[in-house]
Image (spheres, rainbow, N blue to C red):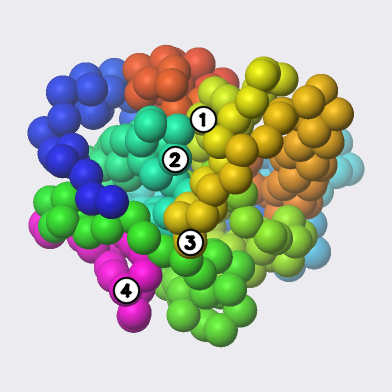
Amino acid sequence: MSTSIDWLQDPEVQQAISRYQMGLPRLPTAGRSGDLLGRGTGSSLEFQEYREYLPGDDLRHVDWGAYARTDALMVRLFREEISPRTEIVLDASVSMTTQQGVKQKLALQLTSLFSQLTNRLGGQPVIHFLNSHQPTPKLSLSNLSQGERLNFDGLESMGELLSRNALTFKPQSVRIVISDFLFPLDPELLIKRLSHNASALWLIQILGEWERNPRPDSGRRLTDIETGEHADMMLSSQVIATYRERLQRLTQGMTIASRRARATFVTLVGEEGLDEVCREDLSRVEILRPA
């Protein structure tokens, strides 16, 4: 399934660009002081805040005056004023086309939004488009419109691509992963691989309203999106309860693994639309901040 969305000129995306900026993290994840945006030592450093000294911190950032006053080793944290290296991982599997296409539309709009916000900071985003094409297509802002002709037809999961090194990243990049995460996965292992050598990791789960909150009904035709085969079945309260339990285990596992990796995990509902998810969900977890 392809899309007719104009990634660059979509009015909802343009409106969001005027209202928000990237909520780039302020604290280090990998034993170095300075802002997570930094790829090295910049010539212009803006003081950010203090925290306690940790083994491996740069001794040049220790505030010896504070140590003399309080007998506590504190280090200054700085924000390096250089452009972020941003990599966007877009799950273009078949499952992202379900729910009348609302998941796919929101995923494309968010990809466009983050790409253009990165560009405003002087960065050059790389988009990993995870469909069936091998090797995995990579897009940039200059050829973002080519995404309109790419199909959401991937059958291999993100975890499988990572396990065979078909999906690789640049070190010290801000990584934004957009997916429904509705594939067999070990949250700890997946997030460990995605966060390796990353400056920051944002995991954005997009679900349809029915996927997020299914309700028992008189019957439903279920279709295997990979084979096209279908079956009619009753969605009883017990079936729904089992599904909800599995979904809850998935989201809890992703949340816990994300906290351990100092990553951010958030779930969005496709039907709510770009404006609402930016204003409510993405702003709440500070992936976006008011411009």
> Which amino acid lies under the numbered mark 3 shown in the image of this protein?
Thr
> Mark 4 or mark 2, which has the lower sequence index?
2
Q: What's the distance in space between the residues labelled 2 and 3, CA to CA? A: 14 Å
User: What range of the chain is rendered magenta?
Assistant: 126-143
User: Residue 148: which disc?
Assistant: none
Q: Looking at the picture, does residue 254 appear above or below residue 70? A: below
**Is label 3 or label 4 in front?**
3
**What residue did someone put label 3 on?**
227
**What residue did someone put label 4 on?**
133
Q: What's the distance in space between the residues labelled 1 and 2, CA to CA? A: 8 Å
* Badge 1 vs badge 2, beta-carbon distance below 8 Å: yes
Query: In the image, is residue 226 part of the stretch drawn in magenta?
Result: no
**What residue did someone put label 2 on?**
98
The front one of 187 and 290 is: 187
Position of residue 77 measured from the top left corner of the image (x, y, whole percent)? 59, 45
> Mark 3 or mark 4, which has the lower sequence index?
4
* In the displayed structure image, the side of residue 263 where residue 107 appears, left or right: left
**What residue did someone put label 1 on?**
208
Position of residue 45 measured from the top left corner of the image (x, y, whole percent)? 41, 48
